[in-house]
Image (cartoon, rainbow, N blue to C red):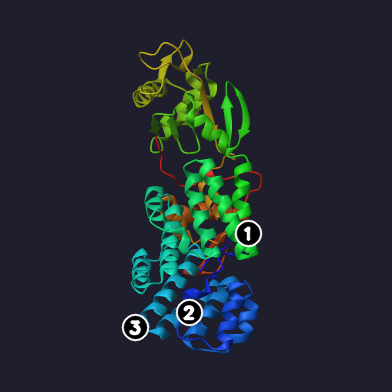
């Protein structure tokens, strides 16, 4: 079962639903689906209601993009197989999870997938058990749980995968490397994914790998250094973070160098002050300017100045391991940390496109249709907050929805010209 970006998650690993000896029509339908030809498969099994046919029809409908019908058919197939055929039932559970994943519905229970994987392993179906594990890893990747995703991925043997599943395995490995900003590792994984996709001869899968590779050659962020601004690629961001430069990272709201990272993601006022000081460095920033931007005050009075002194004190304490904050005649500036003799270079890393909903747009830009609940899970925020943001984007013509109620999904065209890697949910690594 595969989730191709080009056709919104078309499952295609037909052995997933292989059960008792199949007749000629079942065999022909399975081969057609394996070749990415769902219409040819439906020509052979569209009117059949046996369990295997229901499962294959579900795969075909998923490849055609009708994920609602696909889930219904796979559920009917699972019920038809029943407890007397545990392997076939488990394969249907995996198929249903993948179809839900293709619809970016992350509300499914990982326990049901783990149980299906255990049944498959118990009966010697290593390939499909590993594929079920990859589905779980992809969910963890979307949620930004990179350590858990990497731990599970490392337990899998790539040799058990057929070419389509091997391509997805490598795409997941590349996704983890990209989130960690390890471009060499990501490029190697993508090269392997490209080879596996071509071996599979599935155009949609090849297109998904190509799109992932393009992200390495597109601007990932903007860099402000000593007052000048220019776009940078992901490998340049990696080089920057490995240098001795102090980076005020506005993509992930963290201040870091190669050894220490201080997250200010939950301290927006402090990060705003840090960003302003970083953008102006080596010059200072007037107090009135800091107040207006950090606190939104139009008319600066003594209470604003007092609050600024308090917040600067907090910022100085938070960033003490990295940089000092010095008061000047007009305002404040970054300086060398206590005990240091000279100041190092300080830069600010900005998102490729600044937007109040940048992280939300980054998720939607993968070309898939998302549920608001899945977006809320990925962004670790409330569904109501996400819904308000989606309504705002829809009113501006930047997102659109289809379906109603729990079936409602949101999409937006990918924003061309830059990669959204740095905007996706990810832990802060020191």
Horizontally, residue 219 falls left or right of residue 304, namely: right
The span from disc 2 to disc 1 (Cα, nearest Å) is 25 Å
The span from disc 3 to disc 2 (Cα, nearest Å) is 16 Å
SS state under label 3: loop
Disc 2 packing (10 Å; few <14; some 14–19; many ≥20): some
User: Residue beneath label 3, please?
Assistant: 83
Residue 114's x, y, as percent? 35, 66
Which of the two discs, 2 and 1, labels the residue nearer the N terminus? 2
Residue 103 in view in this figure: no
State the mark number for residue 18: 2
Residue 399's x, y, as percent? 59, 56
On the image, which quarter does residue 79 sit in? bottom left
Residue 282 in view in this figure: yes
State the mark number for residue 69: none
Mark 3–mark 1 CB contact (< 8 Å): no
The residue at 44%/45% (across/down) is 426
401 lies above or below 67: above
Residue nearer the viewer, 24 or 270? 24
Which of the two discs, 3 and 2, labels the residue nearer the N terminus? 2
Residue nearer the viewer, 195 or 148? 195
Residue 317's x, y, as percent? 34, 24
């Amino acid at each position: 079962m595969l989730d191709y970006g080009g056709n919104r998650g078309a499952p295609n690993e037909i052995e997933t639903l292989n059960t008792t000896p199949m007749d000629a029509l079942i065999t022909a339908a399975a081969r057609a689906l394996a070749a990415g030809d769902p219409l040819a498969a439906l020509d052979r099994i569209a009117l059949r209601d046996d369990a295997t046919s229901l499962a294959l029809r579900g795969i075909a409908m998923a490849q055609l993009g009708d994920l609602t019908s696909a889930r219904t058919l796979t559920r009917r197939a699972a019920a038809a197989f029943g407890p007397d055929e545990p392997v076939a039932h488990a394969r249907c559970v995996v198929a249903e999870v993948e179809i839900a994943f293709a619809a970016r519905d992350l509300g499914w229970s990982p326990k049901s997938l783990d149980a299906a994987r255990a049944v498959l392993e118990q009966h010697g179906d290593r390939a499909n058990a590993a594929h079920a594990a990859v589905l779980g890893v992809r969910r963890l990747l979307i949620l930004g749980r990179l350590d858990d995703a990497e731990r599970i991925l490392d337990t899998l043997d790539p040799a058990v995968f057929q070419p389509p599943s091997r391509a997805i395995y490598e795409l997941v490995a590349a996704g983890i490397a990209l989130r960690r900003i390890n471009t060499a590792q990501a490029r190697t994984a993508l090269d392997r994914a490209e080879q596996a996709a071509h071996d599979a001869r599935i155009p949609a899968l090849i297109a998904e790998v190509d799109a992932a590779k393009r992200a390495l050659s597109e601007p990932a962020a903007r860099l402000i250094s000593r007052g000048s601004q220019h776009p940078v690629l992901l490998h340049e961001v990696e080089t920057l973070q490995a240098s001795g430069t102090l980076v005020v990272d506005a993509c992930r709201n963290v201040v870091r160098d190669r050894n220490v990272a201080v997250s200010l993601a939950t301290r927006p006022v402090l990060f705003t002050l840090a960003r302003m000081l970083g953008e102006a460095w080596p010059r200072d920033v007037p107090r009135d300017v800091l107040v207006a931007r950090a606190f939104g005050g139009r008319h600066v009075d003594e209470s604003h100045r007092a609050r600024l002194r308090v917040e600067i004190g907090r910022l100085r304490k938070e960033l003490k391991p990295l940089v000092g904050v010095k008061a000047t005649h007009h305002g404040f500036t970054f300086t060398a940390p206590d005990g240091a003799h000279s100041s190092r270079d300080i830069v600010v890393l900005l998102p490729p496109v600044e937007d109040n909903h940048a992280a939300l747009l980054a998720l939607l830009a993968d070309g898939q249709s998302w549920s608001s609940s899945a977006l809320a899970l990925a962004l670790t925020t409330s569904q109501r907050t996400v819904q308000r943001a989606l309504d705002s984007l829809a009113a501006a013509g930047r997102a659109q929805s289809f379906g109603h109620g729990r079936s409602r999904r949101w999409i937006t065209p990918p924003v061309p010209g830059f990669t959204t890697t740095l905007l996706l949910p990810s832990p802060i690594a020191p």
